[in-house]
C-alpha cells in the first residue's frame, strides 16, 4: 500500500523536524511519532468527521508502538479556533493526565493544527506536538513552520505562538475525501509559494494543473515542493522578522476579502487566489514585475477553479478592512509584490494604495491596464 | 534621589536583557524602556493600588521619552491570574491599537508579571514586554527568566510560555509600601537561591536578616545577588530542561501546602520557606546534606518571621496534593535536595517519600531527628 515517501527537513537547530509525504502512510505514523518524540502518551486532537475516518488507524498505529492514546474532538469549522476550545483542550489534557512527556497529535486540517498547536504551545508552558494534516492546505502550508494560534471575535489569528512540531506526517490518501473546492485552495497556497520563490516549480504546476486537481500526476512531488519552499523560508526567518513575510503574498487583500464577505463564504485559499492576482497587478503597475505576471497567476488560478476577481464592496470598506491588518507598521502595510514569477519583495503601501479604486472591477481599474490583454 | 544602580545581565543570545536595581529609578524608566525596545507605544498592565501609587510616574517618564502610553488595571490578587483576564487584556491591547511595535509594561508583583507576560507572549504571537516589579518577590524571582502564565481552576501555572522580557527595572523605593509579611516572602526566595547555589551569599543574608527586613543594610546588593543567581541558572537552562529545576527547591511541598490550605492563606514565600525546611531535613535524612543544614534554613526563615512547620493535614492529603505536581515524571517527582548550604541536586522520589509521615509534627518525625537540636 505504501509508495515512495518524500521527506523534507525543516532545519531549525534543536527544533529541527521532518515532513514526510506519502500515500497510505497513516498506518505507519506510530513508530515515526515515537522516534520523533519518545512519547509514551499521545492525545489526538481532531474533528468528528476526520476522527471517524482516520482516528482508528492512527490510534492503532500508536498503540502498536507502545503509546497510551487519548482522543478529543472539537467541532468542525474555523469557528472552533477560539479561546473557549483551547480551554476545553487544557481540561481534556489534564483529565488525560498529560504531562511534559505527552505528545499532542493534531489530526485534521489547518484549524485543528492551529488550535491544537496553540494548546500544545501553552499547556505546561509547552509540550511536544505532531501534525498529521489531512487537507492539502494543511499539508502544503499551515502544518509547517510552527505558527499556531486562535481567532478572537475582533479578528483572525490575533493570539498564538511560534511552536514547532516534532514531525509532520502527511498521508495523501486522506485527500481523496476532500471536496474539489478545498483541494483547489491547497493548490492556491502551493502556487503562491512557487510565485514568490521558484519559477520552475511554478511551471511544473502549470504543466499539470488539471491532473493535480484530480490528485493525479506528480501530486507527491508537488506537495513536497511547496513544503521545501516553506521549510527554506522558515529556516531563514523562523519568527517572521522579514523574509517569512513574503509568504503573505496574496494574503493582505485576501484577509480583507474574508473580513468583508464574512468568514467561510469565500474559502481562505480562494481569498488568497484573489489577493494574489490583485497583488500581481499592483506589482506590474508599480514597475516591479513584467507585464503578464498577473495574467499567469489569474490563468493558473482559473484552471483550479479558483475565483480571481475582488468581490464588490465600496473602496472605503476595503480600506477599513486593510487598516486592521496586523502587518501594518505605523500607517503602512508591508505589502508583498512580485518582481516576476518566482521572485518577491515587499513595498510599504498605505491601505488606500492597496485597496481597489473602483467598486465595479476591482484593482484592474487602478492599474490602468486592460485586464485580459495578451501577454 | 537616585543612588548607585546595580545591573545584572541575563545572557541569552538575541534574547539577552538587563536587570537594573536602584533606589528612586522609576522616574528614569522611560528612556531605558525606549533604549531596550525602540517602542513608541506602551501598554502598562497593573493593579489598582500599584497603578495609583506609581502609574503616573511611569507614564510621565515614558511620555517624556516620546512614547504613547495606555494603561489597564486587573483586579488585585492571584485570582486574577486566569484566562478570562488574559482575554480582557487582548481586548484592551486591540482597543489601544497595540501592534508588534508595542511594548507591554508589567507594573506590579508576580501576578501582574505572569499575567501580563503571558498576554505579551501570545498577543499577535508575541510582542515585547518589560517587567517593572514592585514587590520583593517579583524583583528577586518572578520578573526574571521569562516564565509567564496563568492558573486554571485545576491548578496553578498550568498554562503559559517562556517569553523573556526586554528589560527588568526594579525601583527599591516601591518596596516601602510593601507589608513586612510580603517582604519576608521575597527574602525567602532570595535565600532559597543562596541555599542552592552560593554559600557566601547565604552567609551574607544571615549576617543582616533583621536589617534587610527593614529594607535597610545591603538591600540592593542582596537583591542583585539573587538576580545574579537566577540569571546564571536561566542562562544555562532557559527552558527548564534540567538545571533550572533546582530553583524549585522548597516548591514541591510548598505547592502542596498552598493547595491544602487554599491559595492565599499561606503566602507563596511562606509556603516555600516551609518546603525548604522540610526538603532540608529530607536532604539530611538521605545523607545528601550534613547535619544542621535544615536548622540553618529554619533559623534564617524564623528571623524573617516566616513559618517553618508543615500545617496539619493527613499524610494522604499531602500525597494527593503532590501527585498533581507537574514536575512528576511517571510516578516520581524530581525533588530538589541540598548537598549542603550552597549546593543542590535532585532525587527522584515518590509522593509517599516526600509527604510528611505524621500529622502532628510534619517531616521532622520521619527524619528521626529532634527538630530543635543544637547545630
Image: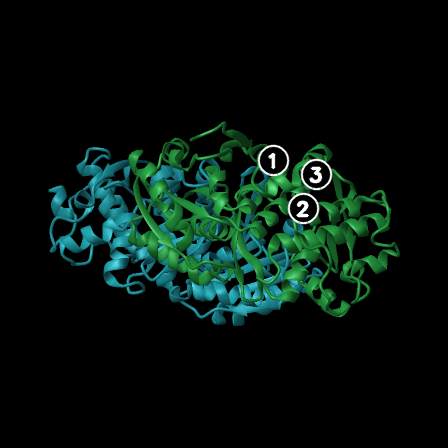
Chain colours: A green, B cyan
Q: Nearer the viewer, mark 1 or mark 2?
A: 1
Q: Residues within 10 Å of mark 1 (few under 14, many from 20)?
A: many
Q: Is residue B313 or residue A363 the one in the foreground?
A: A363
The x and y percentages for residue A321 are 68, 65
Determine if marks 1 and 2 fall on one subunit: yes
Q: Is residue B234 or residue A5 the one in the foreground?
A: A5
Q: Residue at x 64, y 66 (%)?
A: A261
Q: Is residue B9 or residue A322 the one in the foreground?
A: A322
Q: Secondary structure at mark 2?
A: helix
Residue holding disc 3: A206
Quadrant in the picture for the C terminus of chain B: top left
Q: Nearer the viewer, mark 1 or mark 3?
A: 3
> Gap in Å between the C-alphas at discs 1 and 2?
22 Å
Q: Is residue A256 or residue A245 the one in the foreground?
A: A256
The image shows residue B1, relative to residue A20, as above or below, that is below
Q: Residue at x 66, y 37 (%)?
A: A208
State the mark number for residue A222. Answer: 1
Q: Is residue A213 left or right of residue B118?
A: right
In which image quadrant can residue B105 be found? Answer: bottom right
The x and y percentages for residue B18 are 56, 46
> Which numbered disc, 3 or 2, marks the residue that appears first in the sequence?
3
> Gap in Å between the C-alphas at discs 1 and 3?
11 Å
Q: Secondary structure at mark 1?
A: helix
Residue holding disc 2: A245
Quadrant in the picture for the N terminus of chain B: bottom right
Determine if marks 3 and 2 fall on one subunit: yes
Q: Residue at x 47, y 28 (%)?
A: A3
> Which numbered disc, 1 or 3, marks the residue that appears first in the sequence?
3
The x and y percentages for residue A199 are 73, 35
Amino acid at each position: 500500500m505504501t509508495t515512495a515517501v518524500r521527506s523534507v527537513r525543516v532545519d531549525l537547530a534543536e527544533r529541527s523536524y521532518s515532513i514526510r509525504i506519502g500515500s497510505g502512510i497513516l498506518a505507519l505514523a506510530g513508530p515515526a511519532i515515537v522516534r520523533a518524540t519518545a512519547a509514551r502518551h499521545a492525545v489526538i486532537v481532531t474533528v468528528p468527521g476526520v476522527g471517524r475516518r482516520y482516528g482508528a488507524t492512527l490510534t492503532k498505529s500508536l498503540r502498536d508502538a507502545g503509546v497510551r492514546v487519548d482522543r478529543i474532538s472539537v467541532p468542525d469549522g474555523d469557528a472552533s479556533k477560539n479561546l473557549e476550545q483551547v480551554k476545553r483542550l487544557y481540561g481534556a489534557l489534564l483529565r488525560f493526565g498529560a504531562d511534559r512527556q505527552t505528545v499532542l497529535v493534531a489530526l485534521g486540517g489547518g484549524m485543528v493544527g492551529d488550535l491544537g498547536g496553540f494548546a500544545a504551545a501553552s499547556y505546561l508552558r509547552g509540550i511536544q506536538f505532531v501534525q498529521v494534516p489531512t487537507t492539502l492546505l494543511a499539508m502544503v502550508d499551515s502544518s509547517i513552520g510552527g505558527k499556531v494560534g486562535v481567532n478572537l471575535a475582533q479578528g483572525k489569528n490575533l493570539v498564538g505562538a511560534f511552536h514547532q512540531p516534532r514531525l509532520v506526517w502527511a498521508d495523501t490518501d486522506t485527500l481523496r475525501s476532500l471536496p474539489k473546492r478545498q483541494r483547489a485552495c491547497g493548490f492556491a497556497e502551493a502556487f503562491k509559494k512557487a510565485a514568490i520563490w521558484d519559477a520552475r516549480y511554478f511551471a511544473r504546476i502549470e504543466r499539470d494543473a488539471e491532473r493535480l486537481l484530480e490528485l493525479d500526476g506528480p501530486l507527491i512531488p508537488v506537495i513536497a515542493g511547496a513544503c521545501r519552499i516553506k521549510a527554506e523560508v522558515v529556516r531563514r526567518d523562523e519568527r517572521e522578522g522579514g523574509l517569512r513575510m513574503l509568504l503573505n503574498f496574496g494574503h493582505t487583500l485576501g484577509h480583507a476579502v474574508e473580513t468583508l464577505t464574512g468568514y467561510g463564504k469565500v474559502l481562505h485559499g480562494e481569498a488568497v487566489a484573489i489577493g494574489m492576482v490583485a497583488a500581481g497587478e499592483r506589482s506590474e503597475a508599480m514597475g516591479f514585475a513584467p507585464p503578464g505576471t498577473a495574467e499567469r497567476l489569474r490563468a493558473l488560478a482559473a484552471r483550479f477553479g479558483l475565483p480571481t476577481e475582488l468581490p464588490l464592496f465600496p473602496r472605503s470598506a476595503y480600506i477599513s478592512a486593510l487598516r486592521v491588518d496586523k502587518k501594518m507598521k505605523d500607517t503602512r502595510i508591508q505589502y508583498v509584490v512580485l518582481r516576476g514569477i518566482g521572485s518577491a519583495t515587499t513595498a510599504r503601501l498605505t491601505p488606500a494604495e492597496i485597496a481597489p479604486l473602483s467598486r465595479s472591477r476591482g484593482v484592474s481599474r487602478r492599474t490602468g491596464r486592460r485586464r485580459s490583454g495578451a501577454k
